[in-house]
């Protein structure tokens, strides 16, 4: 399973480095199967920090500071609240909530893209608070945050770098919360850093080798990943019975 996680992490890093999302969706089922849902949550939080740092470094010159602050300032306390909420949940309920959210993201993504909505500064701040809390509770909102920053007018490098910087801030707050409540022992921290290193390696590959992927194909791929991840989490929840 560690080999599978490593290979999945590299592939997830390649996809995430190119399109800005997808790593958590691909890794979560494997981490949940290997570590259990409670341990998988802080492991993925640490690996997400490493992965987002890598994306920030790769696209550091394109970060939109204003958009980052508008999103992260309300998002950080909301993520802390969400992480505390998540940790108090039973493992089975946690699996169900995350799986359900992955299923709901499929129509939400298509709705947001078809409407081609635009966000004001106040709306971006409200979106930061909402998605920050959801990230704390349901583990990953990458497929939702990309349309949020795109709606604020960011594209290409600015979109990838700013979303990565904002996600880093949110996941750092979430990981710090886990550490404060005693959910981040050294083995968990080490596992998260190890998984994060595979994500970083994949992102470097994605940066070096430009992979051409049509928007239609990418959206179908993300939908498939969301569906399979949701099915996997519901399966783990059912096994808990």
Image (tube, helix red, strand yellow):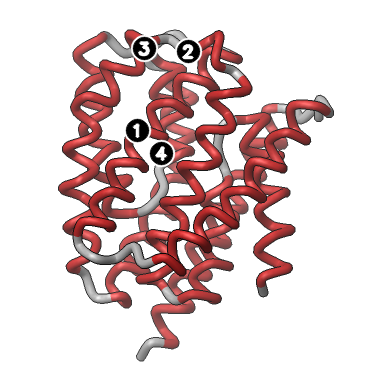
Left/right of residue 106 with respect to residue 2 in the rendered view: left
Q: For the point 35% across and 91% down, which residue is it?
A: 241
Pointer 2: what residue? Answer: 63
Q: Distance between the residues labelled 3 and 4?
A: 15 Å
Secondary structure under the numbered disc 3 in the rendered image: loop
Secondary structure under the numbered disc 2 in the rendered image: loop
The answer to whether residue 236 is above or below residue 240 is above
Looking at the image, tell me whether mark 1 or mark 4 is earlier in sequence order: 4
Left/right of residue 144 with respect to residue 77 in the rendered view: right
Looking at the image, tell me whether mark 1 or mark 3 is earlier in sequence order: 3
Quadrant of the image containing the N terminus: bottom right
Q: Position of residue 70 (x, y in %)?
A: 26, 16
Q: Residues within 10 Å of mark 4 (few under 14, many from 20)?
A: some
Q: For the point 48% across and 29% down, which residue is it?
A: 164
Pointer 3: what residue? Answer: 118
Q: Position of residue 71 (x, y in %)?
A: 29, 22
Looking at the image, tell me whether mark 2 or mark 3 is earlier in sequence order: 2
Secondary structure under the numbered disc 4 in the rendered image: helix
User: Is the Cβ of the residue at disc 4 closer than 8 Å to that at disc 2?
Assistant: no
Q: For the point 69% across and 60% down, which residue is it?
A: 6
Q: Nearer the viewer, mark 1 or mark 3?
A: 1
Q: How far apart are marks 1 and 4 (CA)?
A: 24 Å
Q: Which of marks 4 and 2 is in front?
A: 2
The answer to whether residue 36 is above or below residue 65 is below
């Amino acid at each position: 399973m560690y080999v599978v996680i490593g290979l999945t992490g590299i592939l997830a890093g390649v996809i995430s480095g190119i399109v800005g999302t997808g790593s958590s969706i691909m890794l979560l089922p494997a981490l949940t199967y290997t570590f259990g849902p409670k341990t998988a949550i802080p492991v993925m939080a640490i690996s997400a920090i490493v992965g987002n740092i890598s994306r920030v470094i790769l696209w550091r010159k394109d970060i939109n500071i204003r958009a980052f602050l508008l999103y992260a300032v309300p998002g950080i306390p909301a993520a802390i609240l969400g992480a505390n909420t998540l940790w108090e949940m039973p493992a089975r309920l946690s699996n169900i909530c995350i799986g359900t959210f992955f299923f709901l993201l499929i129509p939400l993504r298509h709705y947001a893209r078809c409407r081609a909505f635009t966000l004001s500064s106040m709306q971006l701040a409200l979106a930061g608070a909402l998605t920050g809390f959801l990230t704390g509770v349901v583990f990953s909102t990458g497929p939702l945050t990309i349309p949020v920053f795109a709606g604020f007018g960011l594209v290409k490098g600015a979109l990838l770098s700013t979303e990565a910087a904002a996600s880093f801030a949110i996941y750092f707050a979430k990981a710090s919360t886990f550490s404060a409540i005693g959910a981040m022992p050294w083995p968990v921290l080490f596992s998260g850093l190890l998984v994060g290193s595979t994500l970083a390696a994949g992102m470097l590959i994605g940066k070096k080798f430009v992979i051409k992927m049509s928007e239609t194909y990418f959206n179908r791929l993300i939908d498939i990943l969301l569906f399979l991840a949701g099915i996997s989490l519901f399966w783990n929840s059912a096994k808990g019975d």
